[in-house]
Amino acid sequence: MDFARELEVALAAGRRAGDYLQAAYSDFKAIPNAPASISTEADRNSQELILTSIAAAFPNDSLCGEEGTPTLAAAKRSGDRLWVVDPIDGTRGFVMKNGEFSVMIGFVHHGKVVVGVVLEPALARTTFAMLEGGCWVQHGKGEKTRCRVTPTNELTDSVLVQSHAKRGETPWPVLAMKPCRIVETYSAGVKLAMVARGEVDMYVNTYPNFSDWDICAGDILVTEAGGQATGISGNPLRYGTPGNSQQDGLLATNGHLHSLAVAALRRERS
């Protein structure tokens, strides 16, 4: 089944939100020690811009988003055709003004993500994918470039991307997999796009309970670039379940490292 129209709408909605967020980001006064739970007017405005664009193109589709906005409140919340939106993923990066945030738009068909767009407004960079259409990156209005994951096949040679750790803290996935280098950034969308673009080898999210919008759009970037994304136990990811909840974490790798990473994480937790 072809999802080119859905990808076109997702990219257009992302550009609309991205234009707004570039201006909002420029005007925003930085908050240096922002909490993880912070939400802003920019989050809500971005979501409305995205959802109104999608609803205009696909009025019968279901919508899922992080913010309680009017278009979401009026929409169906579940169904075989479901749009999953995080209007600013990595809001701390936005309010701290370090550029580490993204817009994430995913389209789920019968529980499986088939379109994903991750836009980084501060860098004017968009990484996007469609089922069986590959993963691509575009800077501004430049040429599209195909994304490929890395060929790394040993955990000790790998580069792991993670959220910013507290000073002196070593997260347990690092202890488990012993990567040769660690990169830190806010935004799961940014992290997943980095895996897809071959800038890092893997990303692990160990939160026990998070939401579909935190990972949905980035999932397909990784898989269409040749990698693999599952729960940290190795179980498949599924979207649109009751509560839009994910409870098995996330492991996204270049594919070559995946079974090694699952085994290492299992040993560390046992």
Image (tube, grey):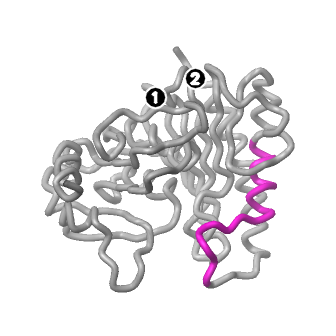
**In the displayed structure image, the side of residue 123 where residue 47 appears, left or right:** right
**Residue lying at 40% horizontally and 49% vertically, measured from the top left:** 249
**In the displayed structure image, the side of residue 52 where residue 142 appears, left or right:** left
Which class describes the residues within 10 Å of circle 1: few (<14), some (14-19), or many (20+)? some
Q: Helix, strand, or loop for circle 2?
A: loop
Locate residue 3: give its quadrant: top right
Q: Helix, strand, or loop for circle 1?
A: loop
Q: Which residue is mark 1?
A: 133
Please say if 44 is above or below 235: below
Task: Answer whether residue 255 is magenta in the image.
Answer: no
Dots 2 and 1: beta carbons under 8 Å?
A: yes
Q: Position of residue 109 (x, y in %)?
A: 56, 23
Residue sitting at the far front: 270
Number of the label disc, if any, that sits on residue 3? 2
Q: Position of residue 255 (x, y in %)?
A: 25, 42
The Cα atoms of the two marked residues, 2 and 1, are separated by 9 Å
**Residue lying at 39% horizontally and 48% vertically, measured from the top left:** 250
Q: Position of residue 238 (x, y in %)?
A: 46, 32
- How many marks are shown on the rendered structure? 2
**In the displayed structure image, the side of residue 26 where residue 114 appears, left or right:** left
Which is nearer the eye, 145 or 169?
169
Region rendered in magenta: 33-50
Q: Name the amino acid type tagged 1.
A: Gly
Residue sitting at the far top: 1
Q: Name the amino acid type tagged 2.
A: Phe
Q: Position of residue 100 (x, y in %)?
A: 55, 68
**Residue lying at 13% horizontally and 54% vertically, measured from the top left:** 154
Number of the label disc, if any, that sits on residue 160? none
